[in-house]
Structures are given as C-alpha cells and as structure tokens.
Image (tube, grey):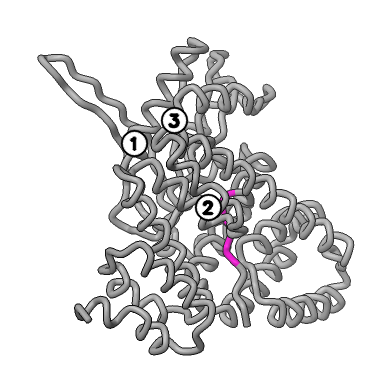
Amino acid sequence: MTNPQTEFDTPWKDAIERYFPEFMAFFFPQANAEIDWTKNFEFLDKELQQVVRDAELGKRLVDKLVKLYRQNGEEAWVLIHIEVQSQEESNFAQRMFVYNYRIYDRYKRNVASLAVLGDERDNWRPNQFGYQLFGCRVGFHFPVVKVLDYQQEWQALELNPNPFATVVMAHLKAQETKSDRNKRKEWKLILTRRLYQKGYGREDIINLFSFIDWVMSLPEELEQEFWQELRNFQEEQRMPYITSVERIGIRKGIEESQGEMRQILLDSIELGLDLKFTSVGLRLLPEFSQIQNVELLRKIQRRLRTANTLEEFRKQVLLDGIELDLEVKFGAVGLSLLPEIAQIQNVELLQEVQNGVKNVTTIEELRQIYLSDLSGG
C-alpha cells in the first residue's frame, strides 16, 4: 500500500481566498475588530509577485497580500504568510522583514505582516527581526499564530462554527496520521461527518471537504473504503452533497494545482541554481525535472537558499529524498535509519542508497548497501 504525499500549501491558499474574513476572525481577532468589513477587500497577487521577484527569495505559494479598509476609513495592506513546512527555516523572520519593507518601499502603503506557522516544531516561533550597528537600531516585530497550539483546544475547535476550525482540525490530524493512514481514514470520515452535523450549507460542505480531502490523502484501497462509508452516511442523512461529480472536480483541481506548483518550483530552482552555482549547478536541473513529488521539490528549493557549496547542496537534497522514500516505504521504522545514513559523506554512495530504497524489501537489505563504508571497509 503506497502512501500518497500530504499536500498543505495549495489547500491553505484556497481556504484563505474563500474565507478571508473568517480567517482573520479566527487567527487574528484583534486586527479583525479594526477592519471595516462593509467595504470590499482585494487580493493583490500581482503586486506581491512583483515584490517577491525583486527580493530574489523565490515565489511563496501561500503568501497573500490583501488590500482592505480599517474602521477609521484608512486603507491598509495586510501581508499574510502561511508556513506549513516540517522543518525550521532560519531566515523566515528576515524574509518577513524584507517583504514588508519591499511592499512599503514600492507602493508606500502601511503594511501589517501576519504569520501562521503550521509546522510540527513546538519551539520554533520566529516573531521578530532586527540588528544594530554604530548606534543605529532596526527592529521588526510581527504577530505569529502556531497551529500546533490548537491541539490543546480540541474541544473548543469541535464547537466552533468558523470554517477555519475545520481547517485547523484537518491540518493537525493530517500531520498526526502521516505514518498511519488507517487512522487517517477514520479521522477523515469523522471530520467530513462533522461538516453535516454543524449544519453547513452545501457550498461550504463542498469547499471544506475539498480542504480535508486534499490534506488527508489516502492510498487507493483506503480511499475506496472511505468513499463507500461516506456514501452510506450521506444516504442516511439524505444529503448527497459530495457526489461523484464534486469528487471528480476536487481531484481535477488538486492535480492541476499540483502540476502548476511543480512547474513554479522547478522554475525557481532553475533560477537559484543559475544565480548561486552558475552553469555547473544547472547540470542538476534535468535530474530535478524528473521529480514528481512536490514536497521534495519544495525541500530542494529551501536547501538552495542555505547551501554554501554545490556538494553540500547535493548531499542535503539526496538526504531529503531518502527521508521521503523511507517514510513512504517503511513508515516511522524506516526513518530510524536517517541519523546513520546522514553520516555518509560520499555523494555517489548516497545516490546508491536512494536507489536502493526503491529496490530493497527490508531495512536490513538497505543497511548492507552502506554499512561497509561507515565501518571503513
């Protein structure tokens, strides 16, 4: 049974675009109270893309820039950063600062930068950036919400009718069950049933189910079981909102968005390789172009920002690929090999290990590929 990858970025982006007032009310109630929702708000995607390109930090798929109005009539721009990565990003606060001043410098608008961190590291909570030199001091602080904190408020989430209570619950359970897809199927059904039990209308049920379905991906066998149980439930409720037509539409949207995201990441990687390692780095592009896994491409993009040498970059990319392959094939048990594999310095041997993950049937077989190297044999 092959576990499909878990995708977070695009469903978060879609949820924010569909339910932006609810997003602000759920995560940033103080700011929400100052917004005049009787006036239209506008997403400024082109403006944000221009700033990101100028900053040479790579396109961020879940960042949103929104023009809105405050209760006092003042026009304001709000920059929303959603981070759903599984590891810390050392320059996150710096990037928040750069985006903020770039927008202000280009458009001369007051900008509020807000961050929602969806990673799994409890102690990673960047909320400021600054430096000082010769008596000159620069300080930048921004509000941060940690999705992980809502684990302690599960009962309140279940009672909350805000769509983002559903988003947070699905996000947390998707992370919790990434190595146990049977448990994920159970929670996917529980959260989908909840949409009907909370009394959402047909459109909201379809929209929120789209998020749940996207982040709580299942192997084909479990997916078939889930849909049969969901059909039975809908027949009992006499509310067949999520039909085969909606399912096909959701799947098509997922596939198209993943294809678009993959191409954007490849373009960003190509630019980064050229800028950082010139034509030598571009020799890796054909290899990366064969990668279909969007999560692995995203990791490659991040590694490109922090790598100092091409060899260091290549090694980290191989380790990221091995990590994903181990988790898919062997689950948490396979990941226990990572500290051992990370000791390998030979890039060619790491490539051999990555190829080996696909071919071996047991963890011990995989270890035989590199054990002699680690022991000095």
Relative to 6, is 280 above or below? above
3 and 2 marks in contact (CB < 8 Å): no
Residue most extreme to the left: 134
**Stretch of the chain drawn in magenta:** 5-9
Residue under label 1, please give it. Answer: 93
Residue under label 2, please give it. Answer: 297
Residue under label 3, please give it. Answer: 113
Relative to 208, is 377 above or below? below
Q: Specify the principal SS of the magenta part.
A: loop
Tell whether position 46 is magenta. no
Q: CA distance from mark 3 to mark 1?
A: 11 Å
Tell whether position 6 is magenta. yes
1 and 2 marks in contact (CB < 8 Å): no
Residue in the image at 28% along x and 68% along y: 344
Q: CA distance from mark 1 to mark 2?
A: 22 Å
Mark 3 or mark 1, earlier in chain? 1
Residue 128 image-quadrant placement? top left
On the question of residue 24 being in view, the answer is no
Residue in the image at 44% along x and 30% along y: 113
**Category of crowding for the residue at label 2, using alpha-carbon neighbours closer than 10 angstroms: few (below 14), some (14–19), many (at least 20):** many
Residue 111: % across, % down: 46, 21
Residue 153: % across, % down: 44, 62
Relative to 15, is 344 above or below? below
Q: Which circle, 3 or 2, is nearer the viewer?
A: 2
